[in-house]
Amino acid sequence: MLRVSLLIAALISLPRTLTLFDLNQKLFDSFSEVSFRDIIIRFLFLFIMSLVSLELNTNWKRIYSQYSIFVRTSLTIVLNTMLFLGIVQLFVLIYPLAVRQVLLESEIGFTYFVYFVVLVITIFITRILKYQMIHHADLLENEKLKQQNLQKELTALKNQINPHFLFNSLNSLNSIVRDNKNATEFIKKLSFMYRYILQSGERDLVSLQEELKFLDSYVHLVKTRYQDRFIIDITIDEKHLQKEIPPLALQLLVENAVKHNEISKKNPLQVNIYSKEEIIYVENEIRLRTSFVDSTGNGLINLDKRYFLLQKQHISISNKKNIFRVKLPLN
């Protein structure tokens, strides 16, 4: 707001500033004769200058948005300077050929002044457009989050009766197989997992420590089926344990590895989960199943959407050197 106010004040005061130094009459006296060709060529160049400047300072800036603020600022200054000097030089070169009239030195100097003013105005306009775009994007994201929360509430109401029935059934089953330690432990882990899923449905983010505890129960279920054919190695720095991620993020990635890869004595599946700087890595060697895999293919897409809506960041997915790797940012 302050910058816009300063710009308006400077532009409105410009004619009186020129009058103060007795420049108005001198400029008008030095101007060449006005013609239709003169107006058309000037209008065309001003239009090109404005359009390119607006594109440069809005859409094209995204190309180097990943660099530091110093590099971005330097590139912006250099590109705007090149645009300003290039357009003016091109105008000075083409004008005599198109209008068949020589530009006076005073007109060339005034042309530099006019195009500089146009450049400053367009830069201010792009700033305003940028803030409007950010505000509009924030409104859309907030609306999406509201819709997701409403959907969660609806789902919770639909499933209100089911949890009690399931937990009662698991407790009954646990009493039946009390003498079987493996079955008892399996039921406990399953019960814990289901309780965690229900509770996490009411939360957008959970601590990494909670997610790892849930993952331990899930891994127990997988190992019950695959025994030593499934290996998981988890190495997470303790300083990250209280940081938050979307619930079921790690479980989804491990389940994805189990679902899509061969798991056999000859080719056991190993999943590695580790932290490095401010990122959690989940990776495994790619050995695709030859049998049919029942999958919607939306798991990773949904996880990425949740990350962006909740933490304004995207997950990173790669499969270089036959290693499937997903990066989950923590900052």
Image (spheres, helix red, strand yellow):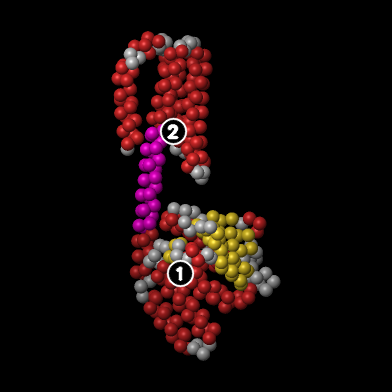
- Residue 105 placement (x, y as % from top left): 46, 13
User: Going 59% across and 67% down the picture, which residue do you hit?
Assistant: 271
Q: Secondary structure at mark 1?
A: helix
Could you say which disc has been placed on residue 54 in the image? 2
Q: Amino acid at mark 2?
A: Leu
Decide which of tag 1 and tag 2 comes sooner along the chain. 2
For mark 1, what is the residue? 210
Quadrant, the N terminus: top left
Q: Nearer the viewer, mark 1 or mark 2?
A: 1
Task: Please tell me in which quadrant of the rendered image residue 44 appears.
Answer: top left
- Label 2: element kind: helix
Tell me where residue 201 sits by quadrant: bottom left
Q: In this picture, which residue range is highlighted in magenta?
A: 123-147
> Does residue 87 appear left or right of residue 264 in this picture?
left
Q: Which percent across, then down, holds residue 8?
A: 32, 29
Q: Residues within 10 Å of mark 2 (few under 14, many from 20)?
A: many
Q: Is residue 35 left or right of residue 268?
A: left
Residue 313 visible: yes
Q: Decide which of 119, 227 is in the foreground and name it.
A: 119
> Most prominent secondary structure in the magenta stretch?
helix
Q: CA distance from mark 1 to mark 2?
A: 48 Å
Crowd tier of the residue under label 1, counting other residues whose Cα lies within 10 Å: few below 14, some 14–19, many 20 or above = some
